[in-house]
Amino acid sequence: MSKVLIVDDDKNILTTLAVYLEDLGWEVLTAETGGQALELVGRHHPSVVLLDLKLPDQSGLEVLEKIKATWAKSYVVIITAYATIDTAVSAVKLGAFDYLPKPFTPAQVEHLLSMIQKVDSLESEVESLKDRLKGIERQGDFVTRSKKVRALLKMARQAADSDASILLAGESGTGKGVLAGLIHGWSPRAQGPLVQVDCTVLQESLLESDLFGHRRGAFTGAVENKIGKLAQADGGTVFLDEVTEMSGAVQAKLLHFLQSREFTPVGDTTPQQVDARIIAATNRNLEQAVSEGVFREDLFYRLNVVEITLPPLRERPGDIELLAELYRKRFSREKGGAPKGFSKDALTTLLAYPWPGNVREMINAVQRGCIVSQGELITPQDLPPNITGSRGSEGGDGVLRSLEAVEREHIQKVLAHTHTIEEAAQVLAIDPATLWRKRKKYRLD
């Protein structure tokens, strides 16, 4: 717990409480109206909201109700000079944690926040115990009941304590980036930066510059010195996504860094030393890439000190409903609390689908369901046509076409109307690396 939102139209109260709570280590957000408060709740998801009952644009009880619908995990404390039994009862019924009458001292607020932290800790322990009884492990966005995946998470925790390089393998969309973040958070480097490098997006010279930095004048367009991602990650971790897409020259430079912990920026002659841990990811078989001569064998062994291969979603069907619920709750909060679940038929559809795009495809499908659903439950009609098997792939002449043909045409259309791979990927709701591979697959270069 770290964020607290103070909502009051009295600027003196806002300033005094903000300074006091910041000194206690809280990240403080402030709002003078209910509208501002709801915007901040939707954007920042504060752990605690100190909410005045009388606001210039709407009542605190109205704001409370909307907060609980948007972000139910917030502990809301009503603060007011107009304390009555009726309003206290109404606030608690709407989900308020407590009621604090004015005037109050900062010390009273500190005591109340301390109580909330203890309650939150106990509730977390209860939830954790419930998960363990059900055979579920939950680490942030990574949730599983698969014994194989739980064993991989245990290995990842053990590896996180060392400085050894880690190789994350598995199909696209299996959660390699999420796991890299967890490993960094579990490691002694958690207070340092986690810097990601997408090896598929940039050309060879630009990737080298992005990773190692460059000096002014090193090449056309290098108008000033640039600090590379390795230097930015000093004391932390570099996550190299799709490492097999590196050129031979960049592979050689990375190998030198892993051997010596130093590198030379492009256009410079003075080596730099950096303390950064490397986590690499690939959706390809690296041993096969080595045998084909497209990846250095010595670099493979340097990166592959600990290898963790994440299984595809179709091999862990017990996680499908868990993940669907996790993201349904998240996207429902953004929508304002609905839909509140999946229909039986929708769950059957999700469980029957093979998920070639893995967890990333699942996230997109659930997000779509939350957006288009008109009722309290997501139904099969709210899910993408390719998942439900509905005939939504007809051309203008009524001729049925394959999913690949429809996908190729749609990607081509999006690429024609956007300026960068990143922008197109955002429109398509996929990551740039996936779009890069699809563009290559459909020869849309």
Image (cartoon, rainbow, N blue to C red):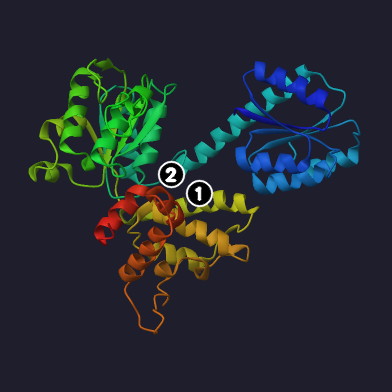
| Residue 364: image location, x then y, percent | 45, 56
Asked if residue 339 shows in the view, the reply is yes
Horizontal side of 439 relative to 125 (left or right) equals left
Q: Amino acid at mark 2?
A: Val
The mark total stands at 2
Question: Which quadrant, please, contains the C terminus?
Answer: bottom left
| Residue 170: image location, x then y, percent | 27, 46
- Please tell me whether residue 207 is drawn above or below residue 394 in the rendered image: above
Query: Distance between the Cα atoms at labels 1 and 2?
Result: 8 Å
- Please tell me whether residue 352 is drawn above or below residue 258 in the rendered image: below
Q: Residue at x 18, y 23 (%)?
A: 256
- Circle 1 is placed at which residue position? 326
Say which of 128 and 101 sits in front: 101
Horizontal side of 340 relative to 435 (left or right) equals right
Say which of 92 and 25 sits in front: 25
Using the image, tell me which numbered label, if any, was put on residue 143: 2
Q: Quadrant of residue 198?
A: top left
What secondary structure is marked by label 2? strand
CB of mark 1 within 8 Å of CB of mark 2?
Answer: yes
Q: Amino acid at mark 1?
A: Leu
Q: Residues within 10 Å of mark 1 (few under 14, many from 20)?
A: some
Horizontal side of 291 relative to 152 (left or right) equals left
- Please tell me whether residue 406 is drawn above or below residue 425 in the rendered image: below
What secondary structure is marked by label 1? helix
Q: Quadrant of residue 64?
A: top right
